[in-house]
Image (tube, grey):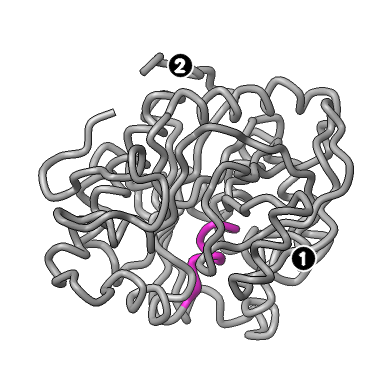
Amino acid sequence: MKTHNLTSPACCFIVVASEERPKRLSESWSPSGLSPQQAAAVKKGILRQSSLRARKMVCPANVLVSAQEADRGMWEGPFWFTRPANRFISNHGAPTSLSTTAALLTVAARAPSCLVAVLPSDFWVSRESVLTEAIEGVFQLLPNTPESVATLGMVDAHVDVDQDYLVVGPNNLQKGAVIQARINRPEPRIAQQLVSEGAIVASGILLGYAQAFASRIFKYWPHLGRELTNMLEPDCFSELEHRLSTETYRDIPRSAINSIRLSPPTFPMRAFAVRGSGWCNRSSLSESRPGAEPRHHANTCRPDFATEVRI
């Protein structure tokens, strides 16, 4: 794979190492036919790939992690290299979106003109160079519209009920496509129709300047933005982990916390289509075990997580 190097201090990656809905996703990680050990190997494999991806694109000091304390046994190993100050940990019922928001506001406070990539860790790509070039391409376009936030949409993924889809308007080569709607896990018939009409799979990858993220957070969740900023200021330069628990967000209304959605349409952004990455979601990977064909991309979506992930 071609190695890309974006080690400029004006660029950082926030890897979301824990999922937003633990109960629902824990069930999807343990499908029929996979033992708990195999399911754990799949999840750790994806986290390892996410870690390698981030370190190849920015220097390790510019990699931040948003995660759940309950999942520490999963993510702490792959992200051993991150400084404690670059870890934003949700516990005591705090959603991962809260720790991700805290990470974004921290970057914005220190370097508002920093380019930020928010990367979920629930997918696998067999062609890292395609994904890397797509991220770099959007980064190069962002100076033309510094106030915008972008996402990537996959157009070569198999039609699957486990996908979320973005309905988009006409594409603009410089600004991407306007996202008209997001359809979460539609029925197969509807998913097929969406794809035939040009819908793209929502990757969850977010790209933009730190200040653009902060501006949206303060616009749509002003109380949350203020409280998190006040909470983070005292230990802004501390070398300890940032922990978000009931004690740290007790002044933030629960309704504000539950309303955090760093995804369209709640969080406005433009979409750029990506072709040929060999993208697979977690459910497809769970079925990519010895003796079984995955539901799609039979030749590109069969990593052997039981051994070691190599990129």
Mark 1 crowdedness (10 Å alpha carbons): few <14, some 14-19, many ≥20: few
- When asked about the image quadrant of residue 239, the answer is top left
- Residue 52, disc: none
Vertical side of 95 occupied by 288: above or below: above
Q: x, y percentage for residue 50?
A: 37, 42
Amino acid tagged 2: His
Residue located at (41% from left, 45% from top): 297
Query: Where does the magenta region start and end?
Result: 94-101
Please name whichever residue, 266 or 37, is drawn nearer the observer in this view of the structure. 37
Mark 2 crowdedness (10 Å alpha carbons): few <14, some 14-19, many ≥20: some
Vertical side of 186 occupied by 231: above or below: above
Amino acid tagged 1: Thr
> CA gap, disc 2 to disc 1?
32 Å
Vertical side of 277 occupied by 290: above or below: below
Q: Which residue is mark 2?
A: 4
Q: Secondary structure at mark 1?
A: loop
Left/right of residue 145 with respect to residue 137 in the rendered view: right
Residue located at (46% from left, 75% from top): 21
Quadrant, the N terminus: top left
Lower sequence index among marks 2 and 1? 2
Left/right of residue 290 with respect to residue 217 in the rendered view: left
Q: x, y percentage for residue 15?
A: 45, 47
Residue located at (73% from left, 50% from top): 214
Q: Residue furthest bottom?
A: 254
Quadrant, the C terminus: top left
Does residue 300 belong to the magenta stretch?
no
Please name whichever residue, 41 or 168, is drawn nearer the observer in this view of the structure. 168
Q: x, y percentage for residue 116?
A: 60, 37
Q: Main secondary structure of the magenta part?
A: helix
Q: Which residue is mark 1?
A: 266
Please name whichever residue, 251 or 37, is drawn nearer the observer in this view of the structure. 37
